[in-house]
Image (cartoon, coloured by chain):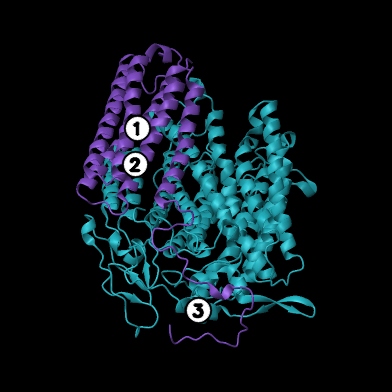
C-alpha cells in the first residue's frame, strides 16, 4: 500500500496492487534551480544515491579494498624483517610502508568499516527509514573515497608519507622528508577528517532524533549506543587533528615554523595536539567493535546481554575518561613528574570500565546455550585477544615500565592485539552476523571456520612474539635488525621475527579465505532464512535485504530486544516460567506489512554530494603542485554548495503535512540536509 | 497485503501487550524523538566541534605569543582602539542578526532580508577592519613567517576572519534566496541556523579579543 514518493515516472507499489492506489503527490520542481536525479537502476542509482544502505555497502566495499592494500603493506614489512640485514625494501621505502600501513588501516579501513556498519544498521536498529541528513551521508562517503585515493596517489607522485602515522616533528619537516609524501598525508587526512566530522554530526542526530516510537535511549541496542559514544568522540577529536594538520601544512607549504625547534618552537605542541586526537581515536576504533560483539554474544548465547546498563555506561565512561589519558603516549618526552603521575592514574582508571565490559560479556556467555557460529567465534576471539592486549596496555600505564618499552616492539605487540584482536576481529564478527541481512545469503560457515581459526592463530603467531622482541630491545620502525645483535638461545631475535612473519601470512591466508567466501556466497542460489540467528534487535524485523524504505510501518518499541520479545512470551510451567516461541519472524514481518504506511517519503538522490566531495582533492592537488588548480577546485566547491542549497526537496511542504490521504502517517526526512 | 493471513496456530500473547504495536502514536511529519529540530541539533553539534578547533588554535597562540624573537611583539603592533571599534561592529552585528531572526519568525520577509543584509554589512566591515589591520602589521614588519608569534597570531585571527567571511557569504546568499522565494522548509529555522553560526563566531571573537589583545603577554 505504501508509495515511495519520488519524482520518478513509475511509482513503486508495495503490497496489494488491487487496492485503490492513493493519489500521487506531484513533486514540485519549481522550488529550486536544479532538478534531482531520478535513476533507480544502473550506476547512477549508486553514484547519486542518498540511501543509507547503499552508502553503507559502498563504505564497506571501499574499506575492504583498503584493508587489502594495508595488509599488503604489512606483509612487505614482515618480509623485510624476516631475515637479518634484509634488503626487500630500501630504508626509504620501508619508512613509507609502515607509515602508510598504519594510516591505511586506521583511517581507510577500521574507521570507515565501522562507519559502513553504522550507516547500514543504525537507522535499522533505531527504527528509522534513513539517516537524518541523507545527502550529508553521501558527502561523507565520497569524501572518504576521494581522500583515500588522494592519499594513495602519493605512491606514484614522488613517494608516500614517511614520518610514521603520528608524524612527529622534526621528521615531518621538509629537511627530513623532502618529498611531497607528508603533504599528501596531511591533506588526505583533512579530507577524510571532514568525512568523519559530517558523518558524526549526521549519526548523532539520527540516534538522538530519529528513533522509533517507544525506543527510549535505554532500549537502544548496544551497537547504537557504542556508535553514539564513538561519534561524539569523533565530533570533538577531529577538529584537534584538523588544527594540528593545518599548522603542519602551513609549516611545510607556507614557511611557518610551528614545530621547528631551530626557530624556537616547541615540538611537543604537535605531540599534544596529535594525541589529544590520537587517544580518543583509539576508542573510536575499538568501541564500534565492542558494540558489534555486544549484539553477537547475546544472540548466540540465547540470553540477554548481562548488565546492559553497565555495558552502556562503561562505554560512555571510556568515552569520557578517554579524553584525559593522551599524554601516556608521551611519557618518554620529559613531561615532568606531576603530569606523568596524573596521566598514569587516569590511564589505569580507564581500564576499569573496559574490564567491566569484559566481565559482562563473559557473564553473558555463562550459562547460555552457546551456538558456535563463525560470528560467535570472532566475538569470543575479541574477548580473548582484546583482554591480552588490554592487560599489556595497563602495564604501559606505569610510567617507569613504559619508558623502558617506548618505541620497542612491545608497544607494537600491545596495540596490534588491541586493534587486530579487538577491532578487526569484531568487524569480522559483524560481517558474519549481518551478511544475511545485507545480502539475503549466509556466508559459508565452513569457510568461515577456516577464516576464523587462521586469523586467530595468525594474530597470536604474529603479535605474541613481538612482546619478546620488544623486551629484547628491538626498536620499532627500524628497517633492519643486524645479525650481530640477534642474540642466542630461546630469546634470539631471528627466530621470533620469522615466527611473526609466518604469522602475518597466516592472517593474510585467513583474509583471503574471507574474500573467497564472499565470492562463493555471491554465487550461491540458496537464500538465507529471514531470521537465521534468532536475533533480538529491530534490524531483523525487516526483509533481507531490507526494502528501500526499511520498514513498511515504523515499529513501536516496548522493550529492549524488541524483536526477541515479539517472538517469545514468558509462560508459567510446572518448572517455573519458560520462554515460549509465539511467532515466527515471517509472521511478524507480515503483520508489519499489513499495517504498512500509506505514504512514505524518502529523500531523492542528489548530484551534489559527489560534486562537492570532488572539489576537495582538486584543491589539495593544487596546494601541492599549483595553486591555480586550487582555484579551479574552489570553483567546483562553490558550484557544489549552491547546487546543494538550491536543489528542490522531493515535494512541496504542503504535500507532507498532514498526509495527503489521511489514511496513514508519513515521515519526512530533513529537507535541508 | 490482504492475502497474507496471520497463522492463528501461534499462541496469542496473553498479557504482554506486544500484539498491539499500534501505529496510532506516530506523530506524522516533522516530529523527532526529542522534539528538537534535526537541523538545529546538527548546527549545535557542529558548533561544539568548532569550539575544539578554536581551542586548538587559541592554545597554539597562547604558547607562542611571547616568542617573537627579533621581530615586533604584541605590544608593538596591536592598535587596541582600532580593534575595539571593529569588535564593537561585530558585536552589533549579533543584534541585527537577532532582529533578522525575529522578523523571520513573524514571517516578515522584507525586514528579514533587510536585517540579514545589515548583518552582512557589519560583518564585512569587521573583515575590512581585519584586512586593514593585517596590512598595517605587515608594513610594520610583521609577516606571516616573521616569528612564532606572528604565525600563530595570523593563523588564529585568519581562521576567525575566514569564518566571518563565510558567514557574510551565507547571509547574503540567504537574503537572496529568500528574495527569490526559493527556500523550502521552515524559513525562520534556516535564518535561525545561520544566526546560531553567526553568534558563535561573535562569541569566539570575544574570547580572542580578550586573550589576544587585552591581556598583555
Colour chain A is painted in: cyan
Disc 3 versus disc 1: distance between alpha carbons? 54 Å
Chain hosting mark 2: B
Residue located 44% across and 87% down the image: B3
Q: Would residue A613 be found to the left or right of residue A167 on screen?
A: left
Q: Which residue is disc 2 drawn over?
A: B194
Say whether mark 1 and mark 3 are on the same chain. Answer: no
Are the residues tagged 3 and 1 within 8 Å (C-beta)? no
Q: Which residue is disc 3 drawn over?
A: A591
Q: Which x, y percent locates residue B8?
A: 57, 87
Disc 2 versus disc 1: distance between alpha carbons? 11 Å
Residue located 28% across and 29% down the image: B122
Q: Secondary structure at mark 2?
A: helix
Q: Which residue is disc 1 drawn over?
A: B94
Q: Which x, y percent locates residue A10?
A: 28, 75
Any idea which chain is the purple one in this picture?
B
Q: Secondary structure at mark 1?
A: helix
Q: Is residue A86 above or below residue A30?
A: above
Q: Would residue B50 be found to the left or right of residue B184 on screen?
A: right
Q: Nearer the viewer, residue A182 or B163?
A: B163
Q: Quadrant of residue B76?
A: top left
Q: Which x, y percent locates residue B168?
A: 29, 36
Residue located 67% across and 25% down the image: A336
Chain hosting mark 1: B
| Residue B50 visible | yes
Q: Nearer the viewer, residue A282 or B25?
A: B25
Amino acid at each position: 500500500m505504501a508509495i515511495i514518493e519520488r519524482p520518478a515516472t513509475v511509482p513503486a507499489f508495495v503490497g496489494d496492487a488491487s487496492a485503490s492506489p492513493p493519489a500521487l503527490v506531484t513533486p514540485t520542481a519549481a522550488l529550486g534551480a536544479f532538478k534531482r536525479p531520478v535513476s533507480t537502476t544502473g550506476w547512477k542509482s549508486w553514484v547519486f544515491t542518498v540511501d543509507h544502505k547503499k552508502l553503507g555497502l559502498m563504505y564497506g566495499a571501499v574499506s575492504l579494498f583498503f584493508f587489502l592494500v594495508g595488509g599488503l603493506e604489512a606483509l612487505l614489512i614482515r618480509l623485510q624483517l624476516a631475515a637479518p640485514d634484509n634488503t626487500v625494501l630500501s630504508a626509504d621505502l620501508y619508512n613509507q610502508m609502515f607509515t602508510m600501513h598504519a594510516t591505511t588501516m586506521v583511517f581507510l579501513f577500521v574507521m570507515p568499516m565501522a562507519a559502513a556498519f553504522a550507516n547500514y544498521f543504525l537507522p535499522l536498529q533505531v527504527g528509522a527509514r534513513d539517516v537524518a541528513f541523507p545527502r550529508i551521508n553521501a558527502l561523507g562517503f565520497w569524501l572518504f573515497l576521494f581522500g583515500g585515493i588522494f592519499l594513495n596517489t602519493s605512491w606514484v607522485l614522488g613517494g608516500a608519507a614517511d614520518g610514521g602515522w603520528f608524524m612527529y616533528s622534526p621528521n615531518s619537516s621538509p629537511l627530513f622528508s623532502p618529498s611531497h609524501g607528508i603533504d599528501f598525508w596531511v591533506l588526505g587526512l583533512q579530507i577524510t577528517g571532514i568525512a568523519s566530522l559530517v558523518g558524526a554530526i549526521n549519526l548523532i542526530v539520527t540516534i538522538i532524533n530519529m528513533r522509533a516510537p517507544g525506543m527510549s535511549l535505554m532500549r537502544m541496542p548496544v551497537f547504537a549506543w557504542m556508535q553514539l559514544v564513538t561519534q561524539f568522540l569523533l565530533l570533538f577529536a577531529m577538529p584537534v587533528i584538523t588544527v594540528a594538520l593545518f599548522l603542519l601544512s602551513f609549516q611545510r607549504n607556507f614557511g611557518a615554523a610551528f614545530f621547528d625547534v631551530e626557530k624556537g618552537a616547541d615540538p611537543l605542541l604537535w605531540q599534544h595536539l596529535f594525541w589529544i586526537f590520537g587517544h580518543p581515536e583509539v576508542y573510536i576504533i575499538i568501541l564500534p567493535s565492542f558494540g558489534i560483539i555486544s549484539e553477537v554474544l547475546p544472540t548466540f548465547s540465547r540470553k540477554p546481554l548481562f548488565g546492559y546498563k553497565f555495558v552502556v555506561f562503561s562505554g560512555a565512561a571510556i568515552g569520557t575518561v578517554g579524553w584525559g589519558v593522551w599524554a601516556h603516549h608521551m611519557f618518554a618526552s620529559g613531561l615532568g613528574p606531576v603530569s606523568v603521575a596524573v596521566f598514569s592514574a587516569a590511564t589505569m582508571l580507564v581500564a576499569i570500565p573496559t574490564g567491566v565490559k569484559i566481565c559482562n560479556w563473559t557473564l553473558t556467555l555463562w550459562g547460555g546455550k552457546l551456538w558456535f557460529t563463525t560470528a560467535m567465534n570472532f566475538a569470543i576471539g575479541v574477548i580473548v585477544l582484546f583482554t591480552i592486549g588490554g592487560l599489556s596496555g595497563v602495564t604501559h600505564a606505569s610510567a617507569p615500565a613504559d619508558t623502558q618499552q617506548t618505541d620497542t616492539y612491545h608497544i607494537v605487540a600491545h596495540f596490534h592485539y588491541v586493534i587486530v584482536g579487538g577491532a578487526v576481529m569484531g568487524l569480522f564478527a559483524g560481517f558474519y552476523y549481518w551478511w544475511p541481512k545485507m545480502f539475503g545469503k549466509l556466508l559459508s560457515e565452513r569457510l568461515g571456520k577456516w577464516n576464523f581459526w587462521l586469523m586467530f592463530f595468525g594474530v597470536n603467531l604474529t603479535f605474541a612474539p613481538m612482546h619478546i622482541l620488544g623486551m629484547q630491545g628491538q626498536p620499532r620502525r627500524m628497517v633492519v635488525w643486524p645479525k650481530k645483535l640477534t642474540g642466542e638461545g630461546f630469546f634470539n631475535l631471528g627466530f621470533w621475527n620469522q615466527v611473526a612473519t609466518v604469522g602475518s601470512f597466516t592472517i593474510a591466508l585467513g583474509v583471503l579465505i574471507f574474500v573467497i567466501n564472499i565470492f562463493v556466497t555471491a554465487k550461491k542460489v540458496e537464500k538465507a532464512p529471514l531470521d537465521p540467528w534468532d536475533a533480538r534487535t529491530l534490524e531483523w524485523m525487516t526483509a533481507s535485504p531490507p526494502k528501500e524504505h526499511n520498514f513498511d510501518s515504523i515499529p513501536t518499541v516496548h522493550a529492549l530486544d524488541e524483536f526477541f520479545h515479539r517472538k517469545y512470551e514468558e509462560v508459567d510451567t510446572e518448572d517455573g516460567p519458560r520462554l515460549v516461541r509465539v511467532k515466527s519472524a515471517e509472521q511478524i514481518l507480515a503483520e508489519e506489512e499489513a499495517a504498512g504506511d500509506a505514504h512514505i517519503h524518502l529523500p531523492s538522490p542528489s548530484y551534489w554530494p559527489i560534486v562537492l566531495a570532488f572539489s576537495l582533492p582538486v584543491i589539495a592537488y593544487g596546494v601541492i603542485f599549483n595553486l591555480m588548480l586550487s582555484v579551479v577546485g574552489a570553483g567546483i566547491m562553490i558550484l557544489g554548495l549552491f547546487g546543494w542549497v538550491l536543489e528542490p526537496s522531493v515535494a512541496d511542504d504542503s504535500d507532507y503535512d498532514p498526509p495527503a490521504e489521511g489514511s496513514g502517517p508519513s515521515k519526512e526526512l530533513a529537507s535541508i540536509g | 497485503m490482504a492475502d497474507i493471513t496471520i497463522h492463528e496456530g501461534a499462541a496469542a500473547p496473553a498479557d504482554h501487550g506486544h500484539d498491539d504495536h499500534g501505529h496510532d502514536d506516530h506523530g506524522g511529519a516533522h516530529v523527532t524523538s526529542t522534539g528538537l529540530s534535526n537541523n538545529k541539533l546538527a548546527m549545535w553539534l557542529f558548533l561544539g566541534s568548532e569550539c575544539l578547533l578554536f581551542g586548538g588554535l587559541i592554545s597554539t597562540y597562547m604558547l607562542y605569543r611571547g616568542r617573537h624573537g627579533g621581530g615586533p611583539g604584541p605590544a608593538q603592533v596591536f592598535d587596541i582602539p582600532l580593534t575595539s571599534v571593529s569588535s564593537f561592529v561585530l558585536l552589533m552585528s549579533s543584534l541585527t542578526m537577532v532582529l533578522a531572526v525575529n522578523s523571520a519568525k513573524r514571517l516578515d520577509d522584507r525586514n528579514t532580508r533587510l536585517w540579514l543584509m545589515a548583518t552582512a554589512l557589519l560583518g564585512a566591515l569587521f573583515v575590512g577592519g581585519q584586512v586593514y589591520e593585517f596590512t598595517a602589521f605587515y608594513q610594520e614588519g610583521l609577516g606571516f613567517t616573521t616569528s612564532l608569534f606572528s604565525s600563530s597570531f595570523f593563523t588564529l585571527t585568519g581562521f576567525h576572519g575566514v569564518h566571518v567571511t563565510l558567514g557574510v557569504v551565507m547571509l547574503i546568499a540567504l537574503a537572496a534566496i529568500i528574495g527569490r522565494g526559493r527556500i523550502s522548509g521552515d524559513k525562520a529555522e534556516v535564518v535561525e541556523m545561520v544566526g546560531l553560526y553567526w553568534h558563535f563566531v561573535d562569541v569566539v571573537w570575544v574570547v580572542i579579543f580578550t586573550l589576544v589583545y587585552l591581556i598583555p603577554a
